[in-house]
Image (cartoon, rainbow, N blue to C red):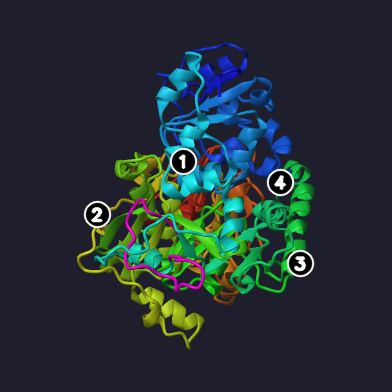
């Protein structure tokens, strides 16, 4: 590759970014780059409804980024290389973010570090990337850079995929019986932590071989048996299109371990959703949803959704309610798949190509992560919530700055343990695993505890829970062990822009709030609704404050109705919607109106993610309810 086009530097300065888009050539190699350019910024939730091909998505690449990029600026600007900073590709697992790069003419991505899902999607989609800034210097000096050499620098499995022409052709060879592991399946036994144990027992050794190995280590790249695979409307169409192009009418492997979820678009047509949202998103969203419905019929896959054969709700909540089991490996085409790690499983998000591969083979590639053990101790005092804890944790410099990282393809997870977890149930603990991805991590896994046992036995009294639970060996190793005393964790919020922008609530109590959202896979469980209702009981909303409540599943809604929680919300004038993803992705009630500041129990507060440019603060359910009562961010104890 020679540099025949232009280089676009995603500078922290919006002015310098606009200068480039206006045609000025600047050398910004040493300028600060925008931290964590996220996939919502690369391709918005609204643009994702339009389709999944380069021609459709290219003009929308980076539209509204830093409020200075206009539609088709990048493609028309003739940019060939894009340069970002740390944590490039944060957020959603949407592989269309990679497709949007390609559609805008980008041939090479250079950044200081990449987030795991986005990096995997580049590998599997064939978009060259590097963290080596000398490559940019060489291009600017007119040298011809060998992009294939960049692929050769990748770990063994990634390199093997590139040599085979992509992950899906690799899958064809695997199914034809020509698979030879690129990883060592004969490593000697050693003490393993819980994460390593779960991965090791699911490693694929080859056809006619029993799954499982004695040992895996951080950095290994292996194929694992997938215990569950899932998709939703945003992604299923692209997955099935890739599947058919690669594998024709070949059957899905173990279709009983696959489900689709109609959850991301089901609330767009609710009465309180702004008309401009409906006009832009409803019809294309319905087309994407219909693609998923047809695929479920064709392949015999279970379909969850309103009026469907299986219950409605947010996919991550439903996976916990119906599918996840300890010791299994789970994947969905959504970044918040780590939710299921609350049940002692290894659960993570993947892109569309990886899912198409998993549907055909029943396997999923895993880069064995580094493991940080977080031991939670002390008494939360019925004040500090898991949301406070995880915002406090991922905002710590160790995670925010990815100090655990040594190489460009490193991954990391948190293994949660400690007696402090015993005061919370699975609803509450799932917030911890769900939001690990917001800290740039692959997933989170909760060590065996009574909350898991009680939840699973309530789900199925016949299950032998203890035989499934995976415990860490006493002398297992970790890249770091952190002990957190809940008595020393402040009530914590995330300021607008990124979930890692943590602040103690006490420093933010002058922030005026107009819009409050209690919803999502992170903030719409029964425990979340109960915590919010306890604050609202006997009180009224502040003048001019809107409150939206969205239960995360039908089961949650039914329980909340039966126990009077929804009555509390109705009495204060809240909008209560059916279960679904809703405003978290800008697709439902609670979308901020012009000029509003939002307090939300959701997990992600990227600019414009909720469908408009207003600032979004992430808070716990109790703080959200107190903010609705006072009209500002506030400690619920002050009430």
Residue hosting label 3 = 298
Q: Give the farthest residue toward the left.
A: 475
Q: Which quadrant holds residue 43? A: top right
Segment colored magenta: 203-222
Residue hosting label 4 = 49
Q: Give the farthest residue toward the front.
A: 178
Q: CA distance from mark 4 to mark 2?
A: 41 Å
Taking 543 as reference, is 217 above or below it? below
Residue hosting label 1 = 498
Taking 538 as reference, is 65 above or below it? above
* The N terminus, quarter of image: top right
Taking 607 as reference, is 184 above or below it? below
Q: CA distance from mark 1 to mark 2?
A: 23 Å
Q: CA distance from mark 4 to mark 1?
A: 23 Å
The answer to which of marks 1 and 3 sits earlier in the sequence is: 3
Q: CA distance from mark 3 to mark 4?
A: 22 Å
Q: Residue 375: x percent and y percent? A: 26, 61
Secondary structure of the residue carrying tag 4 is loop
């Amino acid at each position: 590759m020679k540099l025949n086009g232009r280089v676009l530097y995603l500078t922290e300065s919006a002015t310098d970014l606009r200068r480039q888009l206006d045609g000025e050539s600047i050398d910004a190699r040493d300028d600060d780059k925008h931290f964590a350019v996220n996939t919502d910024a690369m391709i918005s939730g609204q643009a994702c409804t339009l389709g999944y091909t380069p021609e459709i998505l290219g003009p929308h690449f980076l539209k509204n980024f830093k409020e200075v990029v206009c539609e088709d600026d990048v493609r028309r600007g003739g940019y060939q290389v894009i340069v970002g900073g740390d944590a490039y590709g944060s957020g959603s697992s949407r592989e269309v973010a990679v497709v949007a790069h390609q559609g805008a003419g980008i041939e090479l991505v250079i950044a200081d570090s990449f987030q795991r899902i986005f990096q995997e999607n580049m590998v599997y989609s064939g978009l060259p990337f590097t963290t080596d800034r000398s490559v940019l210097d060489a291009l600017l000096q007119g040298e011809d850079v060998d992009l294939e050499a960049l692929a050769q620098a990748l770990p063994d499995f990634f390199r093997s995929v590139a040599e085979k022409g992509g992950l899906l052709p690799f899958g064809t060879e695997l199914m034809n019986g020509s698979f030879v592991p690129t990883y060592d399946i004969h490593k000697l036994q050693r003490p393993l932590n819980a994460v390593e144990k779960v991965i090791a027992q699911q490693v694929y050794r080859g056809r006619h071989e029993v799954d499982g190995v004695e040992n895996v280590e951080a950095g290994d790249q292996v194929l694992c048996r997938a215990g569950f695979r899932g998709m939703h409307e945003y992604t299923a169409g692209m997955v099935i299109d890739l599947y058919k192009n690669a594998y024709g009418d070949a059957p899905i492997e173990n279709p009983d371990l696959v489900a689709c979820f109609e959850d991301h678009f089901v609330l767009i047509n609710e009465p309180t959703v702004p008309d401009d949202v409906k006009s832009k998103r409803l019809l294309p969203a319905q087309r994407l949803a219909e693609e998923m419905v047809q695929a479920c019929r064709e392949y015999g896959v279970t379909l969850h959704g309103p009026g469907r054969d299986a219950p409605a709700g947010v996919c991550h909540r439903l996976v916990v309610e119906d599918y996840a089991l300890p010791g299994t490996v789970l994947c969905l085409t959504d970044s918040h798949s780590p939710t299921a790690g609350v049940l002692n499983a290894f659960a993570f998000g993947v892109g569309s190509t990886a899912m198409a591969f998993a549907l055909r083979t029943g396997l999923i590639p895993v880069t064995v992560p580094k493991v940080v053990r977080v031991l939670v101790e002390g008494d939360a005092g019925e004040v500090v919530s898991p949301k406070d804890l995880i915002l406090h944790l991922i905002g710590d410099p160790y995670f925010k700055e990815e100090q655990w990282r040594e190489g460009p393809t490193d991954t990391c997870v948190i293994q949660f343990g400690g007696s402090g977890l015993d005061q919370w149930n699975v609803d509450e603990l799932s917030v911890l695993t769900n939001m690990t991805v917001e800290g740039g991590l692959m997933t989170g896994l909760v060590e065996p505890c009574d909350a898991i046992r009680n939840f699973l036995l309530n789900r199925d009294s016949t299950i032998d829970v203890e035989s499934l639970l995976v415990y860490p060996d006493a002398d297992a190793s970790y890249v770091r062990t952190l002990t957190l005393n809940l008595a020393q964790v402040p009530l914590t919020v995330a300021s607008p822009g990124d979930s890692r922008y943590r602040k103690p609530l006490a420093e933010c109590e002058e922030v005026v709030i107009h819009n409050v959202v209690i919803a999502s896979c992170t903030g719409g469980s029964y425990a979340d609704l109960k915590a919010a209702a306890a604050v609202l009981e006997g009180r009224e909303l502040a003048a001019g404050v809107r409150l939206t409540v969205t239960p995360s599943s039908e089961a949650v809604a039914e329980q909340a109705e039966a126990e009077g929680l929804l009555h509390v919300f109705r009495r204060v004038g809240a909008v209560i919607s059916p279960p679904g993803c809703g405003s978290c992705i800008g697709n439902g009630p609670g979308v901020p109106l012009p000029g509003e500041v939002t307090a939300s129990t959701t997990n992600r507060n990227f600019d414009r993610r909720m469908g408009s440019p207003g600032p979004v603060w992430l808070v716990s359910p109790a703080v959200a309810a107190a903010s609705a009562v006072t009209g500002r961010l506030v400690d619920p104890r002050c009430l």
